[in-house]
Image (cartoon, rainbow, N blue to C red):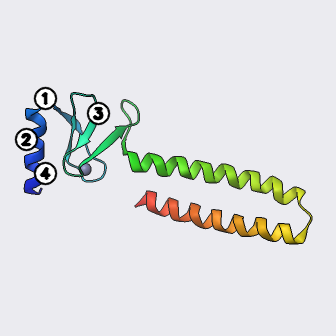
Amino acid sequence: MSDTGMRDMAELLRSGARMLSRSCPECGSPLFQLKSGEIWCAKCQRRVVIVAEGEEVTTEAGIQLESLERTIVSKLSSMETLLTQENDLEKLKNVADVLDKLLATLERLRRIRKG
Ligand SMILES: [Zn+2]
């Protein structure tokens, strides 16, 4: 662990933060609960969101990616309706193009989330 991390942890404790039994999903450092109630990783220098009691902790970035993934999946299913209804070849080509890009983005997102 870096010196900076150690010093930040000491400062957090001094400021009244509580060390939790959970550890950061990103770096494995112990997490702190600030007086404001926020969960903080001193090493990553960022806020960590605990999804639900007893469940895995996820970083805010992870949650955003998950919601982005859900949005893309729902777009993909509305694209399917478009594909079914559209008979104009030129328009179909556009739809296929967008589909292609959405699928590529989805694949990349899933790769990032898996780490
Ligand atoms: Zn961390």
Q: Which residue is mark 3?
A: 38
In three-dimensional space, the C-alpha distance between marks 1 and 2, rounded to whole angstroms, equals 10 Å
Label 2 or label 4, whichever comes before in sequence order: 4
Residue 5 rendering spot, x and y as whole percentages? 13, 51
In three-dimensional space, the C-alpha distance between marks 3 and 1, rounded to whole angstroms, equals 12 Å
In three-dimensional space, the C-alpha distance between marks 4 and 1, rounded to whole angstroms, equals 17 Å
Task: Find residue 94 and report its image quarter.
Answer: bottom right
Q: Amino acid type of disc 4?
A: Gly
- Of residues 47 and 108, the one nearer the viewer is 47
Q: Is mark 3 within 8 Å of ligand 1?
A: no
Q: Which residue is mark 4?
A: 5
Q: In what element is the residue under mark 2?
A: helix
Label 1 or label 2, whichever comes before in sequence order: 2
In three-dimensional space, the C-alpha distance between marks 2 and 4, rounded to whole angstroms, equals 9 Å
The residue lying at 24 percent from left, 52 percent from top is: 44
In three-dimensional space, the C-alpha distance between marks 4 and 3, rounded to whole angstroms, equals 18 Å
The residue lying at 70 percent from left, 55 percent from top is: 76
Up-down relation of residue 28 to residue 93 (above or below): above
Q: Local crowd at mark 3 within 10 Å, few (<14), some, or many (≥20)?
A: few
Q: Amino acid type of disc 2?
A: Ala
Residue 92 rendering spot, x and y as whole percentages? 83, 67
Residue 87 rendering spot, x and y as whole percentages? 92, 64
Q: Amino acid type of disc 1?
A: Gly
The residue lying at 19 percent from left, 46 percent from top is: 42
Task: Find residue 50 and report its image quarter.
Answer: top left
Q: Which residue is mark 1?
A: 16
Q: Quadrant of the C terminus?
A: bottom left
Label 4–label 3 contact, CB within 8 A = no
